[in-house]
Image: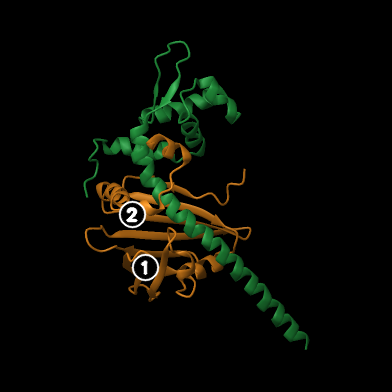
Amino acid sequence: MEPNSYGLSPDHLDATFAALADPTRRAILARLAKGEASVNELAEPFAMTQPAISKHLKVLERAGLISRGRDAQRRPRRLEAKPLAEASGWLEGYRQFWEGNCQRLDALLEELKTEEKKQHLRRKQGDRR
Amino acid sequence: MKNTETLQVTTPTERELVITRSFDAPRRLVWEAWTNPKHLPHWMLGPPGWTMPRCELDLRPGGTWHFGWHHADGKDMEMRGTYREVTPPERLVSTESWGGNWPETLNTLVLTEENGNTTVTLTILYPSMEARDAALKSGMKEGMSLSFVRLDEHLASMAA
């Protein structure tokens, strides 16, 4: 095991993990994966104010997940592929692992609930006899 | 947006990894599903292709547990630990280790119920931040999780 072998500091990793924990920020990253976009363009699909989006962008920027493009007027944001691919892969792996477990657990709990109801009903019917 | 069944994975402190998820069931059923060897092999399987042929547990403080998985391609994985605290249906604390170089973690499962819904919070405490990050990373590296890492579309397109 060789932690941080690609040169990210632990602080940086925590910032990355925190940044990825939020669904809006994940959606912003998904949008930027299709190409760079200005703050206005990013704000549009989210029904959020520009300051709210800017806050999310700041978090992403601090985490090194996005950077600013060259166009001084539009100041487009773009994705920094490497840290995202590496860092989000870790948590994403865990998330996927648990998502599968939880979906199966959902199904099992439905079964247990149905079973309980049936037993309850049978007991009730038994009482009547 | 319905948030109740969204799975959250966070790293709130340097040594912790926290998984949170809500279930549409009372917590005594969630507890049952989480602690009964009759139920566990039906859901605690991770990625597709794995079965759980070994599920032994002695559910009491000081009791041990031993889970084993088998993959269709022949791989095997094992995990074991000791229960520290058993408070049905709300709190289960146990150690967990995959063996080998993997660090032992302290896992705390907390179940809270509200209006018939149960929120599960699983906190995995690593001996150090390095151990946590290394575990997360080597899980990726060693292929244990590679098979189940289906990154969001954006990651797939980025790698291309």
Q: Which mark is residue B70?
A: 1
Position of residue B4 measured from the top left corner of the image (x, y, whole percent): 58, 50
In the rendered structure, are the residues bearing label 1 and label 2 in contact, judged by CB atoms less than 8 Å apart? Answer: no
Q: Dot 2, crowdedness within 10 Å: few (<14), some or many (≥20)? A: many
Mark 1, chain letter? B
Q: Chain B's shade in the image?
A: orange
* B49 over A79 or under it: above or below: below
Q: Is B15 in front, or is A64?
A: A64
Provide the letter of the chain coloured green.
A
Local packing at callout 1 (Cα closer than 10 Å; few below 14, some 14-19, many 20+) is some
Q: Chain of mark 2?
A: B
Do circles 1 and 2 both sit on a common chain? yes
Looking at the picture, which amino acid does disc 1 mark? His
Q: Which residue is mark 2?
A: B125
> How far separated are the C-alphas under marks 1 and 2?
26 Å
Seen from this angle, which residue lies furthest top? A73
Q: Earlier in the sequence, mark 1 or mark 2?
A: 1
Picture disc at residue B160? none
Which residue sits at x=34%, y=35%? A83
Q: Quadrant of the C terminus of chain A?
A: bottom right
Of labels 1 and 2, the one closer to you:
1
Q: Residue at x 22, y 50 (%)?
A: A1
Above/below status of A18 relative to A60: below
Residue B12 at x, y percent in the picture: 39, 45
The amino acid marked with disc number 2 is: Leu
User: Where is residue A104 drawn, in percent x and y?
Assistant: 52, 62
Q: Which residue occupies the extreme bottom position in the image?
A: A129
Foreground: B100 or B74?
B74
